[in-house]
Image (cartoon, rainbow, N blue to C red):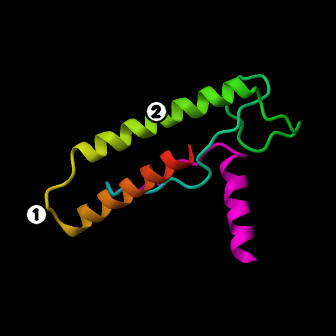
Amino acid sequence: MQSWITRINAVAAMFSAAPFPAAIGSQKKFSRPLLPGAALMSSGGSGVQPGPDPTGSRGHGEEQIRSHEARFRVLSTELAELRSYPPDRKVKSRELEEYRQRDEYLEFEVSWT
């Protein structure tokens, strides 16, 4: 039961608000952005709203489709670039782990977009 609730909450969060930025720190380490990953378009099509639309409108379908297609293209390009330059086997394990985390994150985002 709890896994269903968690999954429903995650999906609802992904489609109900603008994405939060990644955490900021002094290290150059990859940090996965916080959920949600999808943006909600306003009914006027003027941009992204910070939270759920109080009118209940989900925006124009065509604009949302274009937005999702653009996000898919950007993420797919990032994933292709990342995979085209894999790290050497001789690099530190921390760098390999960051590469793996970024690859998993982009793969997940591409599969959900």
Residues shaded magenta: 1-26
| Side of 101 where 40 appears, left or right | right
The amino acid on which the numbered mark 2 sits, given as a three-letter code, is Arg
Mark 2 — residue? Answer: 73
Front residue of this view, candidates 4 and 29: 4
Mark 1 — residue? Answer: 90
| Side of 20 where 82 appears, left or right | left
Is residue 15 something one can see in this rendering?
A: yes
Residue 67 lies, with reference to residue 97, above or below; the image says: above
**Residue at position x 72%, y 23% in the image:** 45
Give how far across and how far down residue 6 sits, in percent: 69, 68
Give how far across and how far down residue 101 sits, in percent: 37, 60
Label 2 CA crowd tier, 10 Å (few <14, some 14–19, many 20+): some
Element marked by disc 1: loop
Q: Residue furthest right?
A: 55
**Residue at position x 42%, y 39% in the image:** 76
Q: Are marks 1 and 2 in contact (CB under 8 Å)?
A: no
